[in-house]
Image (cartoon, grey):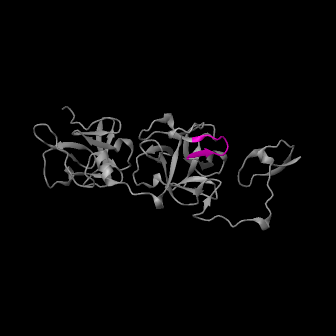
Amino acid sequence: MALDVQSAMDTQRRDIIAHKKHNGLNQQWDLLYVKTLKPALKKGDLNKRYGLYIQRPFFIQTQMPSNRYLDIVNGAVVLKTPNSFKSQQWYFDNVTKTIRSVKTNQSFNIQGNGRSKHLRLYNNNSRWWQLFYYRGNNFVNVNNNRVVTVSAGKDYEGQAIWVQKRHNKAHQRWNVVYVDTAPKENLKDIAEDWGFQLNKDFFFVSRMPMRRVAATDSNNVRLVTLKRTDKRQMFFFDSATKTIKSSTWKDRSLSMSGNNLRTVTTNARWFQLFRYKDAHLINERGKAMDVSGG
């Protein structure tokens, strides 16, 4: 008979029993003599086994061309443009050995107790489906060796994140960018990429004969006669969230809902991201701002 963790469940306060020897990990033990103990790791130290610094916030940046970050949408882990929200910051917790969200304190979790390919956030339980090493630019699960992967290899805004067998193409490789050393975004590059002067008020002036402008009442966006002093007719491009915000309601951004255009609370989802190019305002899925009925 061998010393055995009951049912091989690696959980706090799990019973230890005697069981017929089968040489599973739940029967294998290392002897660690008290006098050989090294000082406990503390905040800011590198956990070499897991490849991450303890409680030091970081971004997880894809090595695909967009260099987007991992983010959270309704508990799912997705790929998104950098937007300054806490939902894009993560940290390694040395107690639970999990990668946790700065925003929610929940951990990376392979859905279905590790039986799924979907990566979501869940309350911390330190089971194997929540434990990942960072090695060789991959986040590798400690049990099944599946790695964090951008689904279908699509470098799209809001693309879902899965765990899959390692092949080490760009959509499985990640940079860990610690917040305290992250380079500031180049504002000139942002302006060129998105087509706006940054953080400056402007009007959307229609090229139709009357040259009316877009205006918002905090929700709807409608065509009205230009009034130079009316802030409801003014917008600005926010360089942090990459969204077009109302100059009156600065917590609200232009947002697509089906074919409707609204201003809603800023969340920097793909339907709030628009580029200005060749006199068109085009969102991430190719739809353009349009006056209904022409």
Residue 36 or residue 118, whichever sits in front: 36
Q: Position of residue 157 (x, y in %)?
A: 41, 41
Taking the image as shown, residue 13 lies to the left or right of residue 78, namely right
- Would you say 249 lies left or right of 34 here? left
Q: Is residue 5 visible?
A: no
Residue at the location (65% across, 54% down)?
Answer: 49
- Across and down, in percent, residue 36 comes to 77, 65
User: Which of the two residues, 240 or 119, is positioned nearer the viewer here?
Assistant: 240
Give the image location of residue 3, x and y in percent. Answer: 84, 50
The residue positioned 47% from the left and 61% from the top of the image is: 180
Quadrant showing the C terminus: top left
Tell me which corner region of the image, top left, top right, bottom left or bottom right, holds residue 93. Answer: bottom right
Q: Relative to 59, is 278 on the left or the right?
A: left
Residue furthest to the top in view is 293
Q: Is residue 145 magenta?
A: yes
Q: How many marks?
A: 0
Toward the left, the furthest residue is 209
Q: Nearer the viewer, residue 197 or 256?
A: 197
Image side of residue 250 versus residue 212, left or right: right
Q: Is residue 152 above or below residue 204?
A: above
Span highlighted in magenta in the image? 137-147
Looking at the image, can residue 199 be seen?
A: yes
Residue pictured at 82% horizontal, 43% vertical: 23
Give x and y (percent) for residue 87.
Answer: 46, 52
